[in-house]
Amino acid sequence: MSDVLTDEQEEFRDSVATITKEGKRNFIHPKKPKGKFYNLRTWFSVFYLVVFFTLPFIKVYGEPLFMFNIVERKFILFGMIFWPQDFFIFGIGMLTFIVFIILFTVVFGRVFCGWACPQTIFMEMVFRKIEYWIDGDATQQRQLKKMPWNGEKIRKRAIKFVVFYTISFIIANFFLAYIVGMDQLLRYVTHPGESIGTLAALLLFTTVFFFVYWWFREQVCIVVCPYGRLQGVLLDANSIVVAYDYKRGEKRGKLTQKEKENLKAGYGRNCSGKSCSGCAHAGK
């Protein structure tokens, strides 16, 4: 296969799926995934969510297992209390964690983003699954978006709004539990009038979470996340990435019998299995 690609063939490199040609936001309606790896990710996510919602209830010597009380400047890790004068230890721990993430990326690529990132877990394994349940698959979601405001659309949007905001409220409460402790959170819940400021802050963070999972979505990874912004300098030619493979993807359309055999053999769609420039099988 020739190294020289036409302008039309190169066009896929010059565009981002989340941005239109006019530079505006392009909302993504992903097709509902399936397969063994997605099922495995689902089970991993269930484990992460159980851990996230369980840890605030665990205590060690009467103290929470994890607590990051910025207001009282009290930090607890695995039951050990760190005060401001011990902050250098906490700082070293954070730097160690950041270095670990960088090394992990160099070796395994973006596995963290897909399998362990809280944003991905909540977006893809909680809110997205609910969206599929309410709005349907990608085609149905696009049809619903284009549909005029009738009874069906209003009903689905209202249900989705209530469910998303309720889950965002629950998530915000548990994040607050990691800051003030579960005992203090339960006191806020049973006596909401005693801390109007805390309730207002809780509703503010609930609204932020709701905004992220209702509208902002993947833009968090593209625009906000520092880890995502650093990917370009953390990866090399041998890193594992989720990227479009032109050799296997073009030209689009129904496969011929020979192309199906090539794909089964592990070759690119247009690859004959012989030496071809740019192919994974070059030189064979």
Image: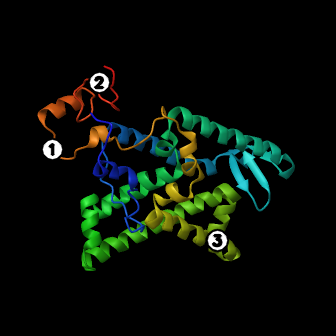
The residue tagged 2 is 275
Q: Earlier in the sequence, mark 2 or mark 3?
A: 3
> Which of pointers 1 and 3 indicates the residue nearer the eye?
1
Q: Mark 1 — residue? A: 254
Residue at x 24%, y 67% (from the top left corner): 143
Amino acid marked by disc 3? Ala
Kind of residue at disc 1:
Lys
For the C terminus, the image quarter is top left
Residue 157: image location, x then y, percent: 35, 72
Which residue occupies the foreground of this view, 218 or 184? 218
Residue closer to the observer: 179 or 185: 179
- Real-space CA distance between mark 1 and mark 3, rounded to the nearest whole angstrom: 54 Å
Task: Give the left or right position of residue 118, taking residue 156 as reference.
Answer: right
Give the quarter of the image for residue 51. top right
Q: Name above or below for residue 163 compared with residue 229.
A: below
Helix, strand or loop at disc 2? Answer: loop
Kindly identify which numbered label has been placed on residue 201: 3
Q: Amino acid at mark 2?
A: Ser
Residue 187 seen in render? yes
